[in-house]
């Protein structure tokens, strides 16, 4: 196979190097294109643009493959703990017993947040959206750890930022939930594992005992793993872009949380449940809503359907669909939203509109039903996505910095007015 690509621009032919990935994905290295031809590439929405070489996550959208550091997502979701996957993403290998113990201990050691953070919560109205709070709280960690701001940090300092982020994220997420109820916060209990600690801080009522249900722990562990990384998606690209300016890790990840909030990205899990409720309230006429999603004059889209890269199936959705049945059965919950979701899926998958466009349920389609069964309100769903995605954001940001990637700065094709003189206001 040729190791260059030829491009002919207005009669001028140049050769561009091909970059091959370890799974034989092919990229054309266009870094010299403008210098050699004066032209740039235009790819709105980055549908065809590789912005990084990365050794973290491999994804084949046609075959429905997702692997982290070479391990299949199905294998990890079945067998690993979320912290093992976090270690894997960040350090490139699965931890042995000693490495796991050390990683886990370091995270347990940093779970508490500075008491002054409570003052920030006090300023917000009870009804403020959890994601708005999460963006602010994650970024505000940089104020509590100003030593994280410098660019010349040593390895120990970098590790400390990682431990702090992973450790404080569940505490902050649980505080956000408690804030929404107007209830006092629970402190972390470091004898508990990562997921149990989060559930305890979230659901333990100050006046009552709370028994941590292993069914919930296992389900949440799996869900967090399924969200842990997804290569160069919108929020991860945001984290990398912000981090490329050498902004600190907390600010970079705060920006990623903001990108995740949108309903086309992580915000879709909230939208799915709201859509299912709407369909239920409307009498459960699934066909009507599928037709609305197909109607180009109607803004309605089937939330939790379609994906930029998966064009056959989303492997995460397959695992979640099964987990959804298991969790509801184990908890003895009957949720009519699940029936509507299954009917919606069946109807859409048989419809030529969805078949032709290769639109399938994505990770967000069934996850909300599990979160709901676990007792989370819909506004918390995207926060749970962020909790899962955190190790991926950290790993991707660190990789970008370790590769000494230059500041991200796309170009544009200008389509505005050409030069014109200033005219006095009264004469316009
Ligand atoms: N319902 C109806 N039509 C759809 C949908 C949908 N959910 N998704 C895509 N289409 C149509 C779209 O209108 C377009 O049709 P046409 O070719 O006639 O113009 C075609 O399918 C291609 O869609 P696109 O918007 O060009 O594709 P994209 O890659 O830019 O967008 C997407 C991907 C995920 C934003 C989109 O499928 C969508 O809006 N889905 C609903 C929101 C959602 O579930 N988001 C969560 C994504 S998974 C979690 C994550 O990692 O972010």
Image (spheres, rainbow, N blue to C red):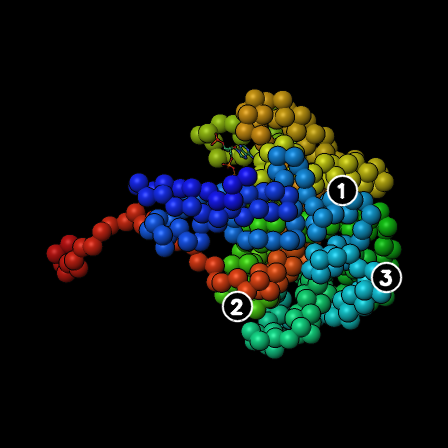
Figure quadrant of residue 126: bottom right
On screen, residue 41 versus residue 69, left or right, reads left
Ligand 1 within 8 A of label 1's CB? no
**Residue that appears at 68% across and 66% down:** 162
On screen, residue 19 versus residue 365, left or right, reads left
Residue 2 drawn at (x, y percent): 51, 41
Q: Up-down: is 350 above or below 395?
A: above
Q: Please, what secondary structure does the residue beneath circle 1 have?
A: helix
Q: To which residue does mark 2 refer?
A: 246
Figure quadrant of residue 392: bottom right
Ligand 1 position by quadrant: top right
Q: Please, what secondary structure does the residue beneath circle 2 have?
A: loop
Q: How many labels, in total? A: 3
Alpha-carbon neighbours of circle 1 within 10 Å: few (<14), some, or many (≥20)? some
- What is the C-alpha distance between the residues marked 2 and 1? 35 Å
Q: To which residue does mark 3 refer?
A: 97
**Residue that appears at 68% across and 58% down:** 391
Q: To which residue does mark 1 refer?
A: 74
- What is the C-alpha distance between the residues marked 3 and 2? 34 Å
Residue 349 drawn at (x, y percent): 63, 26
The residue most toward the front is: 2
**Residue nearer the viewer, 282 or 104:** 104
Residue 356 drawn at (x, y percent): 55, 25
Residue 420 is marked as none
Q: Up-down: is 290 above or below 198?
A: above
Ligand 1 within 8 A of label 2's CB? no
Figure quadrant of residue 422: bottom left
**Residue that appears at 46% across and 29% down:** 296
On screen, residue 209 versus residue 34, left or right, reads right
Residue 8 seen in the figure: yes
Residue 156 drawn at (x, y percent): 69, 74
Q: Earlier in the sequence, mark 2 or mark 1?
A: 1
């Amino acid at each position: 196979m040729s190791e260059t690509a030829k491009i002919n621009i207005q009669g001028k032919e140049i050769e561009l190097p091909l970059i091959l990935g370890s799974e034989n994905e092919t990229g054309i290295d266009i870094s010299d294109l403008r210098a050699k031809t004066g032209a740039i590439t235009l790819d709105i929405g980055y549908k065809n643009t590789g912005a990084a070489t990365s050794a973290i996550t491999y994804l084949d959208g046609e075959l429905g493959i997702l692997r982290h550091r070479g391990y299949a997502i199905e294998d990890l979701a079945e067998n690993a703990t979320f912290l093992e996957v976090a270690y894997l993403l960040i350090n490139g290998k699965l931890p042995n017993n000693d490495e796991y113990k050390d990683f886990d201990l370091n995270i347990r050691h940093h779970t508490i947040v500075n008491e002054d953070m409570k003052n920030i919560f006090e300023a917000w109205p009870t009804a403020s959206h959890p994601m708005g709070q999460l963006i602010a709280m994650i970024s505000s960690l940089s104020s509590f750890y100003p030593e994280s701001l410098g660019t010349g940090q040593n390895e120990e300092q970098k590790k400390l930022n990682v431990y702090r982020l992973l450790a404080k994220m569940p505490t902050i997420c649980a505080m956000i939930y408690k804030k929404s109820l107007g209830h006092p916060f629970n402190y972390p209990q470091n004898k508990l594992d990562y997921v149990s600690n989060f559930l305890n801080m979230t659901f333990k009522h100050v006046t009552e005992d709370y028994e941590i249900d292993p069914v919930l722990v296992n389900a949440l562990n799996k869900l967090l793993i399924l969200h842990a990384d997804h290569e160069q998606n919108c929020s991860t690209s945001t984290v990398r872009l912000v981090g490329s300016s050498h902004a600190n890790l907390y600010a970079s990840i705060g920006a990623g949380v903001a990108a995740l909030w949108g309903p086309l990205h992580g915000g879709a899990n909230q939208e799915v449940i709201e859509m299912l409720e709407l369909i239920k309230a409307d009498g459960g006429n699934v066909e009507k809503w599928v037709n609305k999603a197909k109607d180009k004059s109607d803004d309605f889209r089937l939330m939790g359907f379609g994906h930029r890269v998966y064009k056959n199936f989303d492997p995460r959705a397959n695992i979640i669909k099964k987990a959804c049945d298991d969790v509801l059965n184990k908890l003895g919950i009957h949720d009519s939203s699940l029936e509507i979701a299954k009917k919606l899926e069946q109807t859409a998958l048989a419809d030529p509109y969805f078949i032709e466009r290769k639109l399938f349920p994505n990770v967000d389609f069934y996850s909300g039903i599990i979160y709901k069964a676990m007792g989370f309100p819909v506004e918390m769903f995207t926060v749970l996505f962020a909790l899962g995605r955190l190790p991926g954001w950290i790993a991707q940001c660190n990789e970008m910095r370790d590769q000494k990637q230059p500041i991200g700065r796309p170009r544009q094709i200008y389509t505005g007015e050409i030069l014109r003189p200033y005219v006095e206001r009264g004469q316009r």
